[in-house]
Image (cartoon, grey):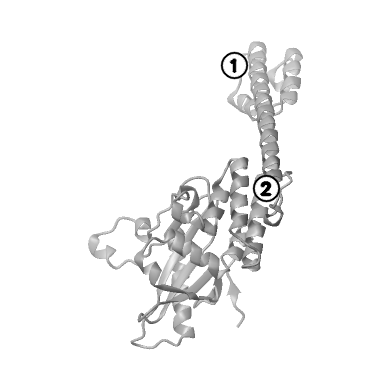
């Protein structure tokens, strides 16, 4: 029987693919955990045992689902068994209210997959799973991080039987990335670049990241960081001449380009502000002329005027209002 595949939510953006590529490197995963999980048990992990595992699951109704990345690693010392790290890298610009429910589905499918592939029997134990969400939106994450917060109110006796799950959230824009201990953390530096809005400061951050990624040490990791940074800079500064990490030996040139782009952006913003003011003025003038000529205007006519964003079109309508015989002659509705 052919498997039925779940309908995808939508194609992954280049930004999402960049993150998936980046966190396909065990070094990046290690720096993520060491930098942002400040708990004692993290120091007990054997990061040399980091191993990528499959991220496709088939449920009992034969629907195939995909997570983004799954890693596993062992504890050091006498502790036995595997610790599974589950990374869900969706990177939405707005928070998803039911993320906890989605994570529950992924973790459940992961457990089923482990039971089947590892041929677990009665008495065997399931490994621990850490659901981790990295969020890069500008506004704070608003969704509950615990599944229990999504339930309708129920009696305490019933609540104890409902499934529970909480996921770890890293909201990039709300992290304290200036801590001295994160100075050499490449992932923390990447998050700073992601959330930086000042082009000159961004130039300095990219230059710092360049120094933290010597090509001779790990060229593949540097390449993944370079692709991610290039993609971000091209989206943030469209039309600007942005050198890659490999071209940053001339840091002064890069900073000069950022300053020039910043000045250009400010000029464009001032121009947009003048244009917006002109539109508002013409819209007000048109409504005044029409009211004087035709009396109280129907709400639908006023709404149509408010929708017009071209000063030129508003100017033409104002001239037309001076000679039109009625509001109907304006043909706004």
Residue identified by numbered label 2: 251
Label 2 residue SS: helix
Q: Quadrant of residue 262?
A: top right
* 303 is higher (above) or lower (below) than 76: above
- Whether residue 180 sits left or right of residue 204 in the image: it is left
- Whether residue 64 sits left or right of residue 245 in the image: it is left
- The number of discs equals 2
Label 1 residue SS: loop
Query: Foreground mark, 2 or 1?
Result: 2
Q: Quadrant of residue 64?
A: bottom right
Say whether disc 2 or disc 1 marks the residue closer to the N-terminus.
2
Mark 2 and mark 1 residues within 8 Å of each other at the beta carbon: no
Residue that sits furthest to the left in the current view: 157
Front-most of residues 35 and 9: 35
Where is residue 323 shown, x and y percent of the image?
Answer: 76, 13
Where is residue 215 shown, x and y percent of the image?
Answer: 65, 64
Residue identified by numbered label 1: 296
Front-most of residues 144 and 3: 144
Where is residue 322 shown, x and y percent of the image?
Answer: 74, 13
Where is residue 304 shown, x and y percent of the image?
Answer: 65, 28
Residue drawn 68% across the image and 44% down it: 252
Front-most of residues 235 and 27: 27
- Whether residue 102 sits left or right of residue 204 in the image: it is left
Real-space Cα separation, disc 2 to disc 1, in angstroms: 63 Å
Judge the density around disc 1: few (<14), some (14-19), many (≥20) Cα neighbours within 10 Å: few
Q: Quadrant of the C terminus?
A: top right
């Amino acid at each position: 029987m052919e498997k039925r595949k779940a309908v995808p939510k939508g194609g992954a953006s280049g930004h999402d693919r960049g993150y998936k590529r980046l966190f396909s490197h065990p070094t990046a995963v290690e720096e993520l955990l060491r930098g942002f999980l400040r708990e004692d048990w993290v120091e007990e992990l054997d990061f040399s045992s980091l191993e990528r595992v499959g991220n496709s699951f088939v449920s009992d109704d034969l629907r195939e689902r995909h997570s983004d990345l799954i890693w596993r690693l062992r504890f050091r010392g006498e502790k036995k068994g595997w610790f599974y790290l589950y990374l869900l890298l969706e990177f939405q610009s707005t928070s998803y209210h039911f993320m906890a429910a989605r994570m529950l589905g992924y973790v459940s499918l992961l457990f089923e997959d482990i039971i089947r592939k590892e041929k677990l029997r009665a008495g065997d134990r399931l490994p621990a799973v850490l659901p981790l969400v990295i969020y890069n939106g500008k506004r704070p994450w608003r969704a509950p991080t615990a599944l229990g917060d999504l339930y309708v109110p129920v009696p305490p006796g019933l609540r104890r039987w409902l499934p529970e799950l909480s996921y770890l959230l890293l909201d990039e824009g709300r992290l304290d990335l200036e801590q001295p201990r994160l100075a050499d953390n490449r992932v923390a530096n990447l998050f700073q670049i992601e959330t930086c809005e000042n082009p000159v400061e961004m130039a300095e951050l990219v230059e710092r990241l360049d120094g933290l990624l010597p090509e001779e040490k790990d060229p593949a990791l540097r390449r993944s960081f370079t692709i991610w940074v290039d993609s971000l800079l091209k989206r943030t500064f469209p039309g600007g001449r942005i050198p890659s990490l490999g071209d940053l030996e001339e840091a002064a040139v890069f900073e000069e380009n950022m300053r020039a782009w910043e000045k250009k952006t400010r000029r464009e913003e001032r121009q947009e502000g003048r244009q917006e003011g002109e539109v508002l003025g013409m819209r007000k003038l048109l409504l005044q002329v029409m009211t004087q000529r035709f009396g109280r205007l129907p709400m639908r006519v006023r709404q149509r005027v408010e929708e017009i964003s071209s000063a030129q079109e508003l100017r033409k309508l104002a001239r037309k209002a001076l000679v039109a015989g009625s509001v109907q002659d304006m043909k706004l509705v």
